[in-house]
Amino acid sequence: MEKLLVKNGLIVTMNPDNEVIRDGSIYVEDNIIKEIGPDSEISNKPGVKEIDAHGKTIIPGMISCHNHLYSAVVRSIPYSGFESPDFSFVSWMDRFWLPLLEDKVDQEVMYAGTRANVLDHLRSGITTTTDTAEGSYALPGALDAVDDACMETGIRAVLSFETTGRISEENAAMGLQENVNFIKKTRNRDYDRIMGRIGVHTTYTCSTDLLQEVKKTADELNAGYMMHHLDDRYHHFDTCRRFGKRPTRYLADIGFLSPNLILFHCSYIDQWADPPIFKEYDVKVAHNSESNAIFSFWPDMLHLIREGVTVGLGTDGQTFNYFEVMRTAQMIHRIKYENPELMKDEQVLRMATTEAAKVLQLEDSIGSLEVGKKADIVLLRDRSSVPVFEVNAINYIVNTCERTDVDTVIVDGEILMDKGEFIKVDEKEIYAKSKEQALKLWEINNWPLP
């Protein structure tokens, strides 16, 4: 890995002191930040590749805590499934998403969609993503396809397969084994940019026995695990009908909750009873603000945050502009409570960086620009109509920046995008292959073709 010196930029460190360094430099060696500070304090380094960041803002690589990366292939589909006058999210899943998309996903779709989605995320300043691969008929080997795509494109990733009991006990066992095999695979190789967790779908598609087996397996492997939770009101109805308990209390009572668990969405938690349970078990939360808003959900993270629960942001796969995701997280809470002082800019940016790193239990290595951490670095062009400096830099990032402002992306000390151009992969080829796979799905479902 080459040595890098990123110099002469405005560094927004997101360190505990919230330090912003004017005319700052970052020296990287062996993919680790070795020095950071004002240019005048960082000595010249012979034989080092220099990146001139003059006029640019330097931020930590952002982190998405939840994704379905293959779903780049199923964006903008010519039929959405929303036409039924009796629409609900769970019925839409049963009538449309599961039979027409997820159950028809194969490893080619996973590979092609993941590559395209990773480029979208890198171009948005996301250097670490967290994926839950869907496609129960793509087993075994589904995660190998996702892994190949992530290694090829260079992103840092936490990968899992969505274990589910909705098809059969045999398929559920295959899904869990897919996760186990992948975790062992990543632990037995030198490439450490990708790691595994155990993925599981949700309470209404999994039996108690399956959820307990997931937890038991995660404990035996000393691995993290993650699951969708309360993205729809139906979850309450389902667990109350089956067990006489709301979903969060049910999960606590069956021994499923722990500090190693990430729960996605949590849009319809019991705002009075659930936050203390989350805090008691130190459960982490991935808040997918824009994705939830598109589906007319109105998630409320404030009670969790006030309780001290760790909450990071995610894209959910269909969306990928992290600046929009941050602004959406900010706006939906301010609108709900009619309070413009909620979700301050620094808090929202931390949910995309330092808090997101804590969700993944990787806060010692990513999430901020500090000596000893991985060199995941993003340079933003200055498109501002006012000077950007220590006082307003975070406000500018959250309120004004767009993905088109992302100029340079560095992951693990490797330059993946330079001046807006990908240098590791062929961007046109990746999007062309994604379109090919999309057309195959459209043909299978007899949707209109171009």
Image: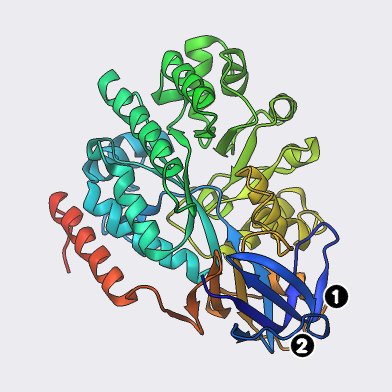
Q: Position of residue 197 (x, y in %)?
A: 48, 38
Three-letter amino acid code at disc 2? Val
In this view of the protein, which residue sits in the foreground, 184 or 52?
A: 184
Q: In this view, does 361 lie to the left or right of 439?
A: right
- Label for residue 216? none
* Point 74% across, 43% down: residue: 302
Residue bearing mark 2: 386
Q: Where is residue 359 in the image (x, y as percent from the top left)?
A: 63, 43
- Quadrant of residue 385 within the rendered picture: bottom right
* Point 22% across, 46% down: residue: 106
Q: Earlier in the sequence, mark 1 or mark 2?
A: 2
- Looking at the image, can residue 299 be seen? no
Q: Distance between the residues labelled 1 and 2?
A: 12 Å
* Point 54% across, 73% down: residue: 409
Residue bearing mark 1: 391
Q: Position of residue 29 (x, y in %)?
A: 62, 70
Q: In this view, does 130 lie to the left or right of 142?
A: right
Q: How is the image coloured?
A: rainbow
Q: Is residue 403 above or below residue 171?
A: below
| Proximity of marks 1 and 2: CB atoms separated by less than 8 Å | no
Three-letter amino acid code at disc 1? Val
How packed mark 1 is, by other alpha carbons closer than 10 Å (few <14, some 14-19, many 20 or more), is: few
- Looking at the image, can residue 408 be seen? yes
Q: Is residue 327 above or below residue 234?
A: below
In this view of the protein, which residue sits in the foreground, 274 or 346?
A: 346
Q: Is residue 310 left or right of residue 375?
A: right
How packed mark 2 is, by other alpha carbons closer than 10 Å (few <14, some 14-19, many 20 or more), is: few
Q: What element carries label 1?
A: loop
